[in-house]
């Protein structure tokens, strides 16, 4: 008999992404496949997004989470932060097609959303697509390996 392992999803936001983070958590709690690790923030009070983004990144780097969801106002700051770390592949998505391709071709392990850019409905569709799409591998794996090798070569 196969043992069912829940996917661990770490989620983080700043104040501008807080409401969307709560909506996504509510949606994910209803899905039995996921365990959610919320690393903040915990209100709409103004905070600095790197402080919370790094906590999510650390969970993935330490393999305490499989995938991450980061939310700030535009999604840009969280993307800049997350993509500084080798083996983090963060994709800022504003519609489901990008979320699908981010998984199929880029094996993205972090979904980034802009809480001031998209509404809750489309955000949930993006999350559903992101979490249910597998990586295609093949030539895309070669390209991702090139990114890792180039990063190492330039000592980043
Ligand atoms: C906060 O005002 C805003 O700058 C932040 O949420 C984010 O959009 C940064 O990229």
Image: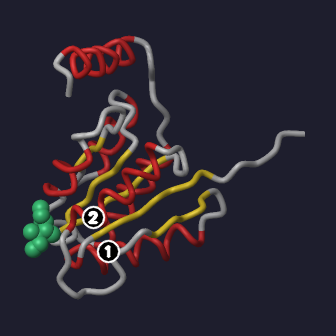
Q: Which circle marks residue 28 in the picture?
A: none
Q: Is residue 94 above or below residue 136?
A: below
Disc number lying in front (1 or 2): 2
Is the residue marked by circle 2 packed among few (<14), some (14-19), or many (20+) residues within 10 Å?
Answer: many
12 and 127: which one is in front?
12
Whichever of callouts 1 and 2 sits on the residue coming sooner in the sequence is 1
Residue 91: percent from left, percent from top: 27, 44
Of residue 99 and residue 43, the one placed in the foreground of this image is: 43
In the drawing, does residue 119 fall left or right of residue 136? left
At horizontal 28% and vertical 39% (from top left) the residue drawn is 85
Depicted 2 relative to depicted 153: above or below: below
Q: Quadrant of residue 94?
A: bottom left
CA distance separating discs 1 and 2: 8 Å
Mark 1–mark 2 CB contact (< 8 Å): yes
Q: Quadrant of the N terminus?
A: top right
What is the secondary structure assignment of the residue under circle 2? strand
Where residue 156 sits: x, y (%)?
20, 28
Estimate the x, y position of residue 120 in percent, counting from the top left: 31, 72
Badge 1 element: helix
Residue 97 drawn above or below residue 105: below
Query: Which residue is under mark 2?
Result: 71
Label 1 CB less than 8 angstroms from ligand 1: no
User: Which residue carries the number 1 mark?
Assistant: 20
Some atom of ligand 1 lies within 8 Å of the CB belonging to the residue at label 2: no
Identity of the residue drawn at 39% across and 32% down: 107
Tell me which image quadrant ligand 1 sits in.
Answer: bottom left
Q: Give the class, few, some or many, for how many residues have Cα within 10 Å of label 1's Cα (few <14, many ≥20).
A: many
Which residue corresponds to the image point at 39% horizontal and 31% vertical from the top-left?
104
Q: How many marks?
A: 2
């Amino acid at each position: 008999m196969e043992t069912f392992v829940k996917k661990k999803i770490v989620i983080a936001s700043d104040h501008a992404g807080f409401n969307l983070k709560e909506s996504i958590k509510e949606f994910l709690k209803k899905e039995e496949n996921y365990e959610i690790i919320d690393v903040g923030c915990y209100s709409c009070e103004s905070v600095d997004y790197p402080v919370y983004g790094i906590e999510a990144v650390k969970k993935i780097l330490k393999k305490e989470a499989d995938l991450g969801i980061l939310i700030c106002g535009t999604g840009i700051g969280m993307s800049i932060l997350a993509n500084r770390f080798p083996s983090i592949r963060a994709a800022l998505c504003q519609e489901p097609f990008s979320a699908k391709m981010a998984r199929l071709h880029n094996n993205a392990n972090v979904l980034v959303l802009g809480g001031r850019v998209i509404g809750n409905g489309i955000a949930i569709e993006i999350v559903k697509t992101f979490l249910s799409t597998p990586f295609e591998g093949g030539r895309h794996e070669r390209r991702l390996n090139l990114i890792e090798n180039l990063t190492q070569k330039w000592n980043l």
